[in-house]
Amino acid sequence: MGADLSAAEAALARGDYGQSLDLLEPLAANNPLPGAEGARIRMLMVTAWMGQGQEQTALATCRQLAKCKDPELRQRAKQLLDVLEAPSLQRPSNWSLKLPNLEMDAMTGAGSISSGPRSLRRNLDPPPPPPPPTGPTRNPTIGFAALVCAVLIGLTMLLSGCIRITTTIHIPGPDRVQLGWEVNSSTQKLMPWQLHLKEALSLSAPSVNVEQNSRLGQQIITAPTLPSAAANELLQRVVSSAATTAGLTLNKPQLIVQEQNWLLGVKQSLTLDIDLNDLPNVPGLNLSIRISAASFRNEAKTSPLLTTKSGNDLIWPLQPGEANHLELHGWSWNRLGVGSLIVLALLALSLILQTLRLKLGFGFPELPS
């Protein structure tokens, strides 16, 4: 199938739509919808039909592709639907030049210009263009320029950077990490990017749960408690989906949790690297990370921005266009180890008291006779 598909794409690239359809029709019969290969083959067929002018056939197939599971193919199909469903505009007659019929005399070879049954000689030079219907072009006035500037400033304030994303990292125990995200829109409405993000996460990270509040423009994304390695992989998938949905390409973040077990407790260290060098500086965009762990009570080493405390949590703001780095160390007590130490201490105290009793001459405790 790969050779036929490549040959069909090559025929489509050089404009041979008939040969491309001849190669694609058997492949479409063997790969029905809603499979990914079937959707890709039919997307090529839609392009070939549009090249042949079969717009109705292409339109019917586009409507089927607009419901496929692949988000990229679904988006392309919707774009083609907008093109196919757009109303056709009638071209004015003065946009084209009509040449008169030439009649040749079979005896003399002389030619004459004819526009009907009567042959009349006309001037071949095109007529001068008509004057513009709106009059001569004038420079924009100050009022028009002020109106345009006001509209642009309003759109910039309304649409640019109206988003706040907070990532929550909770470490409930040794080698256990729970991730969460809170996405808020300052417009109090869900933005199109948020809706596309939910669809992308349903495919790339089905284990996460996305709850939306359309009246507040808020999304709450929660993930189950996972080992640190699985949590790092989940963090990379979510960040990649968010960047792809926004049309960006970001480096993968790294979340590393290292632990050393000392019987009585576990020494933990958290390292987090988030490279935002490729993220443009969007006005109003707010990115931050909330770290919730009882074991991390000391100060964190961060760059370029410092952390702040909010109750028992640490808030770390991220700087777009920079490489953000965090190191945090802490200690988590092992309940089993601490309990074992208390039991050993009580046994030692019991032996000491028993030895003192024997030295004082009381002897071993006896039951009453």
Image (cartoon, helix red, strand yellow):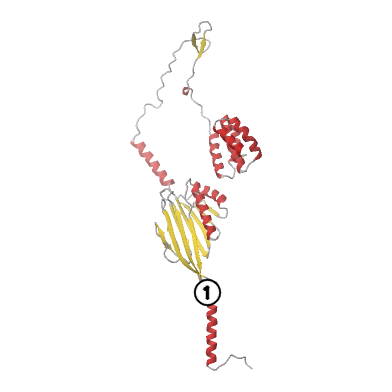
The residue at which mark 1 appears reads as 338
Q: Is residue 281 above or below residue 4?
A: below
- In the rendered image, the residue lying farthest to the top is 107
Q: Quadrant of the N terminus?
A: top right
What x and y, as percent, mark residue 21?
61, 33
Element type where label 1 sits in the image: helix
Category of crowding for the residue at label 1, using alpha-carbon neighbours closer than 10 angstroms: few (below 14), some (14–19), many (at least 20): few
Q: Is residue 202 above or below residue 21?
A: below
Q: Is residue 137 left or right of residue 71?
A: left
Q: Can residue 85 be seen in the rendering of this structure? A: no
Q: Quadrant of the C terminus?
A: bottom right
Q: Is residue 203 left or right of residue 314?
A: right
Q: Nearer the viewer, residue 296 or 97?
A: 296
- In the rendered image, the residue lying farthest to the left is 142
What x and y, as percent, mark residue 165?
46, 54
Q: Can residue 229 be seen in the rendering of this structure? A: yes
What x and y, as percent, mark residue 353?
53, 87
Q: Is residue 32 above or below residue 292?
A: above
Quarter location, residue 141: top left
Q: Nearer the viewer, residue 183 or 353?
A: 353
Total numbered labels placed on residues in the image: 1
**Type of residue at label 1?**
Val
What x and y, as percent, mark residue 24?
62, 35
Name the residue rendered at 64%, 37% in the picture: 27
Name the residue rendered at 54%, 79% in the picture: 344
- In the rendered image, the residue lying farthest to the right is 30
Q: Nearer the viewer, residue 335 or 215?
A: 335
